[in-house]
Image: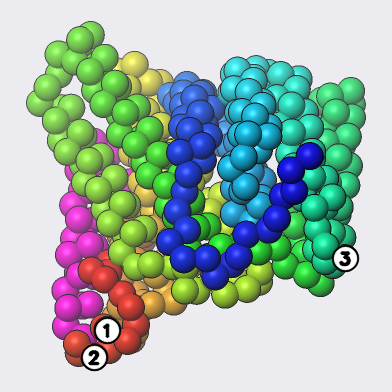
């Protein structure tokens, strides 16, 4: 068997491979399924159940992507065996996506767990292959801990299928915490050689995919509403506001490079785990746009404020989390630090304007970008150059 040698953390020009991009694109199906189910729940007024189901399903999607991406950053050999095993993982992703509707609607995670078994068998074999190839005993221990953690957690998910529904409410978060603890346990005394620039790029690309899915979902919703109701005057402001929100989300997220901040596991793991909120809220913006459109044309059984909240709440959450994970590390002075938190509050306040909330929130998001860019340009040239920031928001 070919050896799987760890890649260098200081490797120059490390970029995502076509296989990684293919892997990401296969997640679009799962994200779209989760978003569609959230739309249905919110439009029917089942807010609590909808949000709980969405949080659980999106965790499964996000964590599967996380498992692959961090391993690939350290051990992607791109040989034939690695590619075949990765394609098996993609098969598991598609099985997981097929199980999203049942998991969301009925709390039946059987198909999703089967998908995870396929992915986990493949990924565990990758960790064992890496352990077999290691010459450093400390690195080998890390690989074996990962393999053992994956197997133990997967056993827990299988057990969950056989417990009463009332017990799953408590068991699911416990298993999710166990999953999150595996990297912390495995790398507690020795770090894998994940690449900061590569990891930052991988997260950026997945964020782009989620934002693209948001645009796609909103576009289809507008098209269907026009075909059925022909209410162009009401839908155009919604579409414009939604586009401004997504454009601003892209600008805010990519305003500054983050890889220089990822200097250790402590920073990188907190940053990586926090992306659950960033990615889930970004995808929820698209679902919220669909809900707002359905409310506008009379298909959703909710109030105008509730339809607006489906957009404004995830938008505000996205901005606030990006500030916590990204922007605050590069902003200087109180005025710059307050831009995104104040913008998030202003967008939440737009909720109470009913049918005008989405256009107003879009205007606030665009103004946020303009203010952030202006404040950044007002800083001395030497300070901008020293911080490494671009046209920040």
Q: Which residues are magenta?
A: 351-379
CA gap, disc 1 and disc 2:
5 Å
Residue in the picture at 24% in, 63% down: 368
Residue 354 belongs to magenta span:
yes
What secondary structure do most residues of the magenta stretch adopt? helix
Residue 197 x, y percent position in the rendering: 48, 63
Residue 287 x, y percent position in the rendering: 41, 32
Where does label 1 land, which residue?
A: 385
Task: Work out whether residue 163 or residue 111 is closer to the camera in this orientation and state it.
Answer: 111
Residue in the picture at 38% in, 67% down: 257
Where does label 2 land, which residue?
A: 382
Which label was assigned to residue 137?
Answer: 3
Q: Quadrant of residue 106?
A: top right
Labels 3, 1: front one: 3
Q: Residues within 10 Å of mark 1 (few under 14, many from 20)?
A: few
Say which label, 3 or 1, has the lower sequence index.
Answer: 3
248 w.r.t. 188: above or below: above
- Is 384 left or right of 236, judged from the image as shown? right
Task: Work out whether residue 46 or residue 314 is closer to the camera in this orientation and state it.
Answer: 314
Question: Do we see residue 79 in this rendering?
Answer: yes
Labels 3, 2: front one: 3
């Amino acid at each position: 068997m070919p050896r799987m040698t760890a890649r260098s953390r200081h490797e120059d020009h490390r970029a995502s491979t076509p296989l990684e991009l293919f892997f990401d694109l296969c997640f679009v199906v799962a994200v779209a399924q989760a978003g569609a189910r959230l739309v249905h729940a919110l439009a029917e007024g089942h807010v609590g159940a909808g949000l709980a189901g969405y949080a659980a399903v999106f965790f499964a999607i996000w964590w599967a992507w996380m498992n692959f991406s961090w391993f690939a950053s350290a051990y992607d050999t791109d040989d034939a065996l690695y590619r075949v095993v990765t394609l098996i993982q993609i098969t598991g992703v598609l099985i997981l996506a097929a199980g999203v509707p049942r998991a969301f609607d009925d709390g039946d995670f059987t198909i999703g767990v089967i998908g995870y078994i396929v992915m986990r068998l493949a990924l565990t074999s990758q960790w064992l292959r890496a352990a077999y190839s290691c010459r450093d005993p400390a690195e080998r221990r890390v690989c074996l801990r990962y393999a053992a953690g994956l197997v133990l957690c997967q056993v827990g998910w299988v057990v969950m299928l056989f417990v009463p529904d009332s017990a799953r409410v408590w068991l699911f978060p416990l298993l999710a915490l166990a999953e999150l603890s595996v990297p912390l346990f495995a790398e507690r005394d020795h770090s894998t050689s994940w690449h900061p620039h590569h990891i930052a790029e991988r997260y950026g690309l997945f964020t782009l995919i989620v934002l693209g899915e948001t645009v796609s979902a909103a576009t289809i919703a507008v098209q269907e509403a026009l075909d059925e109701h022909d209410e162009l005057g009401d839908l155009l402001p919604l579409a414009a506001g939604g586009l401004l929100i997504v454009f601003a989300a892209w600008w805010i997220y990519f305003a500054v490079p983050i890889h220089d901040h990822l200097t250790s596991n402590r920073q990188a793991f907190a940053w990586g785990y926090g992306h659950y909120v960033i990615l889930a809220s970004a995808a929820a913006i698209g679902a919220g746009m669909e809900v707002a459109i359905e409310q506008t044309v009379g298909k959703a059984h909710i109030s105008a404020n509730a339809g607006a909240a489906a957009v404004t709440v995830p938008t505000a959450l996205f901005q606030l989390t990006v500030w916590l994970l990204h922007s605050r590390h590069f902003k200087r002075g109180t005025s710059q630090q307050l831009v995104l938190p104040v913008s998030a509050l202003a967008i939440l306040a737009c909720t109470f304007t009913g049918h005008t909330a989405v256009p107003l929130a879009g205007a606030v998001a665009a103004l946020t970008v303009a203010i952030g860019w202006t404040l950044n340009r007002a800083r001395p040239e030497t300070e901008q150059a020293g911080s490494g920031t671009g046209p920040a928001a």
